[in-house]
Amino acid sequence: MRVMLRWFPLYCLFCLVVIFCGFINGQSSEANKQIGQLHLNDALWIFIINSFQIIIWFALSPIGISVLFTVVFLYGMGQAPYGIEANPVTYYMSSFSHGILEIFVSYIVLVFTFQQFRCFYQYLKYKDMRILKKLYLNLILRYIPASLILMFIASFLEVYLSNRIFLAFID
């Protein structure tokens, strides 16, 4: 865990750069711009969709695609205010509570991806299957449960805090 947290400040800087790039390249969309109050059902659907997405990221991490998904996710966070034509300051301030958890989950996936590459290399070098067994046991017992718990919390924060703050600012 200590190794994982050591790189988090650098990852936060990387996130800010990618989110900013998404923001400066964002364009207004013609999508539905009505923002209503979200409820329990919405929180559960957000959790299910985000959880499915994260499981896919973990599943595709052996080939490194999770790195690309992380960058696209962060870039999309930068473009998000344009999708609803919201004041960016209002949008980002109201989204911080759940957004920081989603960013941390993307960091967990990214760390797992890099650890997986390192373990693959060690396996090829030492031909010790225990290295991979330990990695995937940690995936099942630590990484996925921690990610799902954080996504569960983030989905409820999005519905019951971020959404309410955003609606209060635009009223």
Image: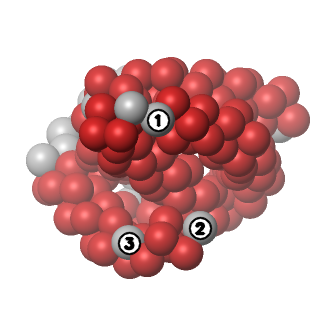
In the rendered structure, the answer to whether residue 92 lies left or right of residue 48 reads: left
Residue 13 percent across, percent down from the top left: 28, 72
- Residue with the mark numbered 1: 128
For the C terminus, give its image quadrant. bottom right
Is 12 placed above or below 64 here?
A: below
Question: Label 1 crowding class (10 Å Cα cut-off): few <14, some 14-19, many 20+?
Answer: few
Q: Mark 2: which amino acid?
A: Met
Residue 22 percent across, percent down from the top left: 21, 49
Instruction: Please say whether residue 37 is visible from this viewpoint.
Output: no
Instruction: Please say whether residue 51 is visible from this viewpoint.
Output: yes
- Residue at image position (46%, 35%) is 128
In the rendered structure, the answer to whether residue 104 lies left or right of residue 24 reads: right
Question: Label 2 crowding class (10 Å Cα cut-off): few <14, some 14-19, many 20+?
Answer: few
- Residue with the mark numbered 3: 7
User: Where residue 1 is drawn, which disc sits there?
Assistant: 2
The CA span between labels 3 and 1 is: 27 Å
From the viewer's side, name the closer residue of 107 and 29: 107
The CA span between labels 2 and 3 is: 11 Å
Which colour assignment does the render follow?
secondary structure
- Residue at image position (61%, 41%) is 134
Is 155 placed above or below 15 here?
A: above
Q: Mark 3: which amino acid?
A: Trp
